Image: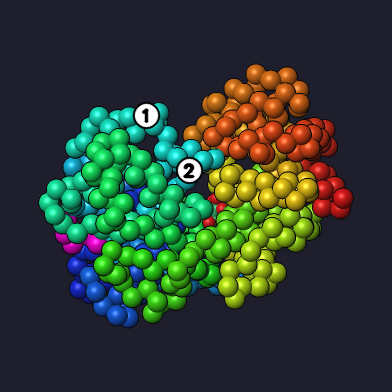
């Protein structure tokens, strides 16, 4: 580590006044939403400084504080790197250290938008139904401890409760996670929680608080130690928390903010629309659905990154097959979008060798991702009488993956809130038929129309057997050519 370099310093420009609280401060938001907001302020002014909140660990605060919360965002293009320093974050709070301080800033009149990137599992909901999981330990905790929540939903509802009591205009809740119709889903979960506290509060939230849905897109692989070193060599400054991102970015947002108050997002390329659903479906199914498929199969086949995986002609043909035969045929294109061209550009993005996006990173939290990324497409194929073999193979690969051993018998470090349960189900069942049956029985992942479909069960079992006997690469070749 080039520790002899001076630490990155915040540029000497006036600090923006507060406007946004962001829950779940991670690399994605710092490389996407935060940059859009910074550009919108540069173009059209306004006070949209961000207070970031980490809900679990202090790492981000500890790394960013010595830099006065400035950081470098590095664009990784096929023809080189382009760093820029972003200084829109004014402070970072660590919720478990001081939940009251988080509620305080969320309740402040100056906070007009609360943005969220807490990942799929951060909503304490059941992915297959979109409903609040009332048995989640954090939800139980937050119902019993009004002044010191732990969960995203607890913080949102308790802060809104306070704003209602103080007659302060509510904030807009802007979800930036990869959930289908993310605003509507979060609104439903928030209302369910609020109803458990006070019916009047729930009615007020339903009438006064807005939850525009958004579609967010930019590939942001986790920063690696060598990225930090390379950047320090280049700039002469040490930034211990830079974010690395591809050149492409997209943000589609429903223009539905409390009292219409928001930064001038339209001026910096954000698409403001009435209904984000078709964009969201397109992105979740074409991008995230194939990302997860390549992640499980690529990992089992021994590929470290997505660009390595699609550099293998077997997987390049496979991903094109998924788009043209299984995903696009059951998708409605958003207005003005050519889906074939969209998928071609996705392939170019995956192939960018400068992006070292690990298959293992994307494979995380599959239990929370499969429904919106893959199972919706599968159900719609089944409904028109077609078994989508490529996606079925991807599900079988996920089943192998959560079993915890790769094709050489090495253990897999499975990161998933259901990891222990899934491994126990897999270990407790004998042979492919029973293993597939056991995992299909997890109702929070698999909806009944998929889990009980006889043709699907058979295809899934065949794929699982094939993975065990012949391996991921051979099976991928087979389903593509079938
Ligand atoms: C990826 C996403 O890690 C994952 O699950 O599929 O983070 C993906 O890179 C982004 O959604 C791209 O916008």
- Residue 324, numbered circle: none
Q: Do the residues labelled 2 and 1 touch (CB within 8 Å)?
A: no
Q: Quadrant of residue 22?
A: bottom left
Question: Looking at the image, can residue 247 be seen?
Answer: yes
Q: Where is residue 288 in the image (x, y as percent from the top left)?
A: 59, 54
User: Dot 1: what SS?
Assistant: helix
Is residue 266 placed above or below 366 in the rendered structure? below
Q: Where is residue 352 in the image (x, y as percent from the top left)?
A: 63, 65
Picture residue at 28% right of the left edge, 32% below the top: 143
Q: In which quarter of the image is residue 364?
A: top right
Picture residue at 54% right of the left edge, 31% below the top: 419
- Residue 130, numbered circle: 2
Q: Where is residue 202 in the image (x, y as percent from the top left)?
A: 28, 45
Range drawn in magenta: 108-112
Picture residue at 31% right of the left edge, 51% below the top: 206
Picture residue at 33% right of the left edge, 75% below the top: 264
Q: Is the magenta stretch mostly helix, strand or loop?
A: loop
Q: Residues within 10 Å of mark 1 (few under 14, many from 20)?
A: few
Q: Image check: 101 left or right of 329? A: left
Q: Which of 107 and 427 is in front in this view?
A: 107
Membership of 79 in magenta stretch: no
User: Dot 2: what SS?
Assistant: loop
Colour pattern: rainbow
Q: Quadrant of residue 46?
A: bottom left
Q: Residues within 10 Å of mark 2 (few under 14, many from 20)?
A: some
Is residue 482 placed above or below 97 in the rendered structure? below
Ligand 1 near label 1 (Cβ, under 8 Å)?
A: no
Q: Quadrant of ligand 1?
A: bottom right
Q: Where is residue 82 in the image (x, y as percent from the top left)?
A: 47, 72
Q: Image check: 185 left or right of 282? A: left
- Residue 137, numbered circle: 1
């Amino acid at each position: 580590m080039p520790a002899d370099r001076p630490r990155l310093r915040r540029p000497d420009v006036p600090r923006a006044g507060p406007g946004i609280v962001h829950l779940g401060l991670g690399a994605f938001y710092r490389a996407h939403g935060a940059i859009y907001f910074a550009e919108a302020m540069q173009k059209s002014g306004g006070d949209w400084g961000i207070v970031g909140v980490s809900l679990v660990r202090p790492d981000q605060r500890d790394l960013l504080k010595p830099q006065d919360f400035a950081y470098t965002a590095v664009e990784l293009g096929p023809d080189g790197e382009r760093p820029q320093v972003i200084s829109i974050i004014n402070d970072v709070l660590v919720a478990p250290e001081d939940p009251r301080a988080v509620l305080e800033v969320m309740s402040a009149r100056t906070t007009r938008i609360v943005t969220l990137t807490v990942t799929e599992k951060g909503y304490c909901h059941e992915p297959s139904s979109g409903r609040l999981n009332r048995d989640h330990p954090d939800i139980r905790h937050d119902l019993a401890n009004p002044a010191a929540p732990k969960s995203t939903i607890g913080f949102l509802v308790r802060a809104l409760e306070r704003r209602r009591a103080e007659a302060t205009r509510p904030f807009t809740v802007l979800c930036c996670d990869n959930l289908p119709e993310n605003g509507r889903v979060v609104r439903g979960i928030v209302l369910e929680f609020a109803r458990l506290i006070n019916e009047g509060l729930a009615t007020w939230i339903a009438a006064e608080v807005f939850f525009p849905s958004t579609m967010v897109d930019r590939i942001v692989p986790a920063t690696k130690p060598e990225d930090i070193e390379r950047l320090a060599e280049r700039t002469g400054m040490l930034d211990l928390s830079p974010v690395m991102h591809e050149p492409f970015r997209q943000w589609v947002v429903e223009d539905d903010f409390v009292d219409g108050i928001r930064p001038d997002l339209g001026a910096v390329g954000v698409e403001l629309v009435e209904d984000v659903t078709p964009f969201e479906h397109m992105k979740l199914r074409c991008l995230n659905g194939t990302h997860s498929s390549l992640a499980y199969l690529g990992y089992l086949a021994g590929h470290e990154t997505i660009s390595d995986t699609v550099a293998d002609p077997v997987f390049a043909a496979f991903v094109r097959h998924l788009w043209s035969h299984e995903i696009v045929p059951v998708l409605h294109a958003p207005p003005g979008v050519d889906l074939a061209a969209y998928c071609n550009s996705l392939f170019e993005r995956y192939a960018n060798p400068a992006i070292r996006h690990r298959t293992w990173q994307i494979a995380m939290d599959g239990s929370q991702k499969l429904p919106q990324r893959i199972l919706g497409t599968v159900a719609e194929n089944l409904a028109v009488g077609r078994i989508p073999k490529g996606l079925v193979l991807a599900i079988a690969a996920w089943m192998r993956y959560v079993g915890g051993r790769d094709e050489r018998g090495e253990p897999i470090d499975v990161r998933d809130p259901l990891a222990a349960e899934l491994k126990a189900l897999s270990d407790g069942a004998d042979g492919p038929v029973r293993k597939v049956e056991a995992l299909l029985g997890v109702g929070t992942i698999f909806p009944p129309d998929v889990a009980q479909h006889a043709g699907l069960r058979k295809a899934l079992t065949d794929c699982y057997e094939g993975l065990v006997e012949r391996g991921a690469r051979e099976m991928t070749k087979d389903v593509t050519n079938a």
